[in-house]
């Protein structure tokens, strides 16, 4: 990636859907941004909470030709953004009018795209990518107006002009060389422009912007049509931008006090992890801890940039620092996935299929159990192609209805016997992987949550 010393002090702040979902949340978000303007700041925002789901629903309704549903969802989309703009900009009628026009323009263009697919009986992925990109465009537009209205000089940068991907347009793979060239240029132009939007012309007083706001998740592919980085991809955008700018840090602002020992939504009494190494945080995310997109850590590692996970609802909390630190011994956290494919092969079948498996299935965990190889694969993977390739090579036992629980840490092998003797669901497991840095167990989905709570209580309470 491009080395860009002039941006060495820039910070990248990413705000997730719940941090930009309501008037209160955006107000907190803007206070946090204001408190960070001792250096230049790049703000990367997600769509308002649930808006990406709504855009997927619009696309599905269009694919099934349901015009009434499309109209209802589009109405909801427009109303939600207009009412947020209204509440944030009620004291600034000039900006409110401009923001409102812009929201209508974005929604009108989107509506035209969606309507054009209504009779096709299908929405191709490249059009779906166009549709779902609008959530981040809408949220960043409104927040850009609101930050300027609050007196924070903020310029708008369209991520589609600097984040490039290849491959699947709904889960693109970043083209780091191209991004490394484009991001410093677009960001610097936007700081230098000194106005909010390109159409507002040159700043009269010639001052630089303090903040550049851009969008997480959305990108362009090499043919310059729309693409996205996959669900939850805004975290990834933030660290990609930070790496391209050689930023001083990345702050991921969300709705929890940092990375917890497990998901607080399913387990009471979780604890904040104060420090975690890059590799342990990446592994937790990869193994299902939804607080971070699984790829977030890699770009930061390439530049040794610290990543902090912080709570927009409780900004005084120190959150979690993800740093290249020495790992302390013992368990750090528990990650899990609810729905997985579990494959078993004979050892012979495994040998024959190993390369295809690694290319097509990207397994989470591969473990040997007696004379079998047991492997878990994320539900989102497209199995069809692999099963075709594997047909006739070996007998494959494929199960669903299973979940996976993974304890991440260091020097863990010693704690496995106690876990297995005290927790029946682990003793009855159908597959496990025990490593110094990771214990993973496959359990029935029906006992997943109880088992996580039991493991958590044994390890952390
Ligand atoms: P955002 O919209 O800010 O990106 P997400 O919903 O993607 O937020 O991620 C935050 C959520 O991740 C939390 O509300 C929490 O339920 C979930 N989560 C899962 N595992 C963990 C964990 N180990 N620590 C903290 N939060 C977790
Ligand atoms: N808005 C996108 C999603 O809901 C990306 C993100 O929130 O990180 O998946
Ligand atoms: Mg997220």
Image (cartoon, rainbow, N blue to C red):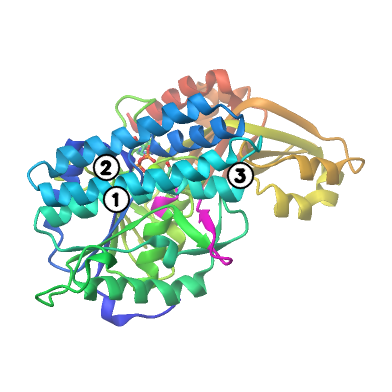
Up/down of 224 relative to 20, above or below: below
Q: Which residue is mark 1?
A: 102
Image quadrant occupied by the N terminus? bottom left
Q: In 3D space, how far apart are the residues under numbered discs 1 and 2 (Cα atoms)? A: 18 Å
Quadrant where ligand 1 appears: top left
Which of labels 2 and 3 is toward the front?
2
Q: Position of residue 451 (x, y in %)?
A: 49, 23
Q: What residue lies at 60% left-to-right and 30% top-to-bottom?
A: 65
* Label 1 crowd bin: few (<14), some (14–19), many (20+), radius 10 Å: some
Nearer the N terminus, badge 2 or badge 3?
Answer: 2
Image quadrant occupied by the C terminus? top left
Mark 1: secondary structure: helix
- Give the number of the disc on residue 364: 3
Q: Is mark 2 within 8 Å of ligand 1?
A: no
Q: Can I make out residue 432 in this image?
A: yes
Closest to the observer, 54 or 245: 54
Q: In 3D space, how far apart are the residues under numbered discs 2 and 3 (Cα atoms)? A: 32 Å
Up/down of 69 relative to 187, above or below: above
Magenta-drawn segment: 221-235
Mark 3: secondary structure: loop
Q: Position of residue 328 (x, y in %)?
A: 37, 52
């Amino acid at each position: 990636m491009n080395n860009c010393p002039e941006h060495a002090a820039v910070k990248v702040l990413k705000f997730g859907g719940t941090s930009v979902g309501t008037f209160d949340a955006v107000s907190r978000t803007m206070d946090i941004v204001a408190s960070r303007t001792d250096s230049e700041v790049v703000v990367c925002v997600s769509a308002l909470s649930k808006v990406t789901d709504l855009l997927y629903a619009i696309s599905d309704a269009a694919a099934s030709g349901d015009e009434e549903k499309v109209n209802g969802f589009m109405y909801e989309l427009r109303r939600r953004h207009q009412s947020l703009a209204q509440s944030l900009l009620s004291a600034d009628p000039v900006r409110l009018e401009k923001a409102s026009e812009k929201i209508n323009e974005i929604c009108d263009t989107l509506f035209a795209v969606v309507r054009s697919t209504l009779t096709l009986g299908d929405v191709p992925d490249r059009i779906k990518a166009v549709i779902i990109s609008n959530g981040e465009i809408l949220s960043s537009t409104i927040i850009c107006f609101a930050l300027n209205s609050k007196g924070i000089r903020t310029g708008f940068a369209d991520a589609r002009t600097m984040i490039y991907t290849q491959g699947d347009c709904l889960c693109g793979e970043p083209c780091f060389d191209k991004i490394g060239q484009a991001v410093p240029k677009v960001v610097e132009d936007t700081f230098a422009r000194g106005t909010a939007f390109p159409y507002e012309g040159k700043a009269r007083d010639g001052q630089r912007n303090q903040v550049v706001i851009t969008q997480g998740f959305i990108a362009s592919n090499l043919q310059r049509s729309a693409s996205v980085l996959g669900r939850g991809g805004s975290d990834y955008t933030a660290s990609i931008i930070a790496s391209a700018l050689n930023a001083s840090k990345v702050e991921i602002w969300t709705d929890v006090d940092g990375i917890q020992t497990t998901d607080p939504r399913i387990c009471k009494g979780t604890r904040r992890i104060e420090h975690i190494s890059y590799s342990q945080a990446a592994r937790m995310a990869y193994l299902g801890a939804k607080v971070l997109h699984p790829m977030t850590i890699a770009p930061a590692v390439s530049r040794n940039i610290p990543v902090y996970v912080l709570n927009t609802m409780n900004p005084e909390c120190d959150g979690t620092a993800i740093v290249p630190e020495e790992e302390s011994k013992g368990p750090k956290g528990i990650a899990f996935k609810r729905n997985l494919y579990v494959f078993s092969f004979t050892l012979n079948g495994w040998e024959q299929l190993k390369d295809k498996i690694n290319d097509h299935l990207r397994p989470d965990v591969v473990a040997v159990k007696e004379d079998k190889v047991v492997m878990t694969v994320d539900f989102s993977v497209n199995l069809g192609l692999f099963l075709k390739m594997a047909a006739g090579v070996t007998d494959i036992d494929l199960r669903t209805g299973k979940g996976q629980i993974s304890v991440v840490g260091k020097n863990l092998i010693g704690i496995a016997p106690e876990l297995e003797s005290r927790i029946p669901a682990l003793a009855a497991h159908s597959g496990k992987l025990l490593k110094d840095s990771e214990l993973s167990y496959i359990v029935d989905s029906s006992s997943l949550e109880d088992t996580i709570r039991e493991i958590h209580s044994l390890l952390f309470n």
